[in-house]
Image: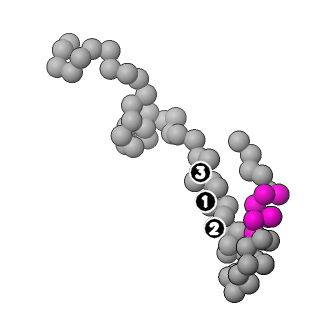
């Protein structure tokens, strides 16, 4: 999924008009980081998935059986 750079730049320009005391570049980085966190896909690596509390496959037998 690609980022919409036009949207990022537009948001940065709008923010600069509202609060000119904030560094323009710094605010762009903050907006970019927020977007990256929002669109980050779930981990595909099973070790990472388990570390985050998930599992790739459903349990085939009840707990304690087998």
**Start and end of the magenta stretch?**
6-12
Q: Residue furthest left?
A: 64
Asked if marks 1 and 3 touch (Cβ < 8 Å), the reply is yes
The numbered mark at residue 30 is 2
Magenta segment: does it hold 32? no
Q: How far is the residue under mark 2 from the one under mark 3?
A: 12 Å
The numbered mark at residue 22 is none
Q: Position of residue 29 (x, y in %)?
A: 67, 68
Work out which quarter of the rendered image holds the C terminus and state it.
Answer: top left
Which one is earlier in the sequence, the residue at label 2 or at label 3? 2
- Horizontal relation, residue 52 to residue 27: left or right: left
Query: Dominant secondary structure of the magenta stretch?
Result: helix
Work out which quarter of the rendered image holds the N terminus and state it.
Answer: top right
Residue at image coords 74%, 50%: 3
Magenta segment: does it hold 8? yes
Asked if marks 1 and 2 touch (Cβ < 8 Å), the reply is yes
Q: How far is the residue under mark 1 from the one under mark 2?
A: 6 Å
Crowd around label 1: few <14 · some 14–19 · many ≥20 (10 Å)? few
Q: What is the secondary structure assignment of the residue under circle 2?
A: helix
Q: What is the secondary structure assignment of the residue under circle 3?
A: helix
* Residue behind mark 1: 34
Residue at image coords 32%, 20%: 59
* Residue behind mark 3: 38
């Amino acid at each position: 999924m690609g980022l919409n750079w036009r949207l990022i730049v537009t948001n940065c320009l709008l923010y600069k008009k509202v609060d000119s005391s904030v560094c323009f570049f710094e605010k762009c980085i903050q907006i970019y980081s927020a977007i990256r966190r929002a669109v980050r896909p779930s981990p595909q690596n099973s070790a990472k998935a388990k570390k985050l509390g998930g599992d790739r496959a459903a349990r085939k037998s009840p707990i304690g059986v087998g």
